[in-house]
Image (cartoon, rainbow, N blue to C red):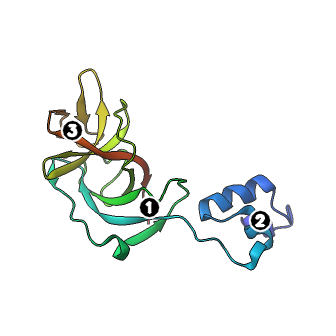
Amino acid sequence: IRDWYGPKSPHPRLDSLEAVARILGVTAGWLAFGEDNEAPEAKTVPVISWVAAGSFTDAFPYGAIEDARRIPTDIDHSDHCFALEVHGDSMDLIAPDRSIIIVDPTSRELLSKKYYVFRQGDEVTFKQFLSNPDRLHPFSSNRNHEAMPVTEETSVVGRVIRVIVDVS
């Protein structure tokens, strides 16, 4: 974006405009020309609670979804998704403590090496699924975390489709 105002390139390229527009949840036409003089509503997902990255822990307490903090996203099917703050270090190589994960509850088919929020009874956890044998695997710098078996009580809340890390 900085280069758009410099002497090298007084006008942004279309592919650059489209990429920025997609991230902002607006059209390239609106970004470039202010079409309709009004930005379309940006896509957002609610941050509804937190999830443990460690042992199974009491299910995340849901608040009123309309009162939840919302974060912008470029995910096309964001109306189905929700976000959770990660607590713990069993997944810190992909999602450090206090990062945000976006969960798609419509995507529950288990695929090896993908990340999910799992439920057992009233408890949940965030882990990577590995097959042969089926297990919930930590992805951590802390070697004390061990894989957990998939049992009859294990169900999928949804697949994690995005990790957002604040580096400040």
Query: In the rendered image of this protein, does residue 79 appear above or below residue 145?
Result: below
- Residue drawn at (86%, 61%) of the image: 8
Earlier in the chain: of badge 1 and badge 2, it is 2
Q: Tell me the crowding category of disc 1: few under 14, some 14 to 19, or many 20 or more residues within 10 angstroms, Cα based.
A: few
Give the labeled residue for mark 2: 29
Give the labeled residue for mark 3: 143
Residues at marks 1 and 3, CA–CA distance in whole angstroms: 24 Å
- For the C terminus, the image quarter is bottom left
Amino acid residing under circle 3: Arg
Indicate which label's residue lies in the foreground, 2 or 3.
Answer: 2
Earlier in the chain: of badge 1 and badge 3, it is 3
Earlier in the chain: of badge 2 and badge 3, it is 2
Residue 84 position, x and y percent, is: 33, 59
- For the N terminus, the image quarter is bottom right
Give the labeled residue for mark 1: 167
Residue 99 shows in the view: no
Q: Residue furthest bottom?
A: 37
Residues at marks 2 and 3, CA–CA distance in whole angstroms: 50 Å
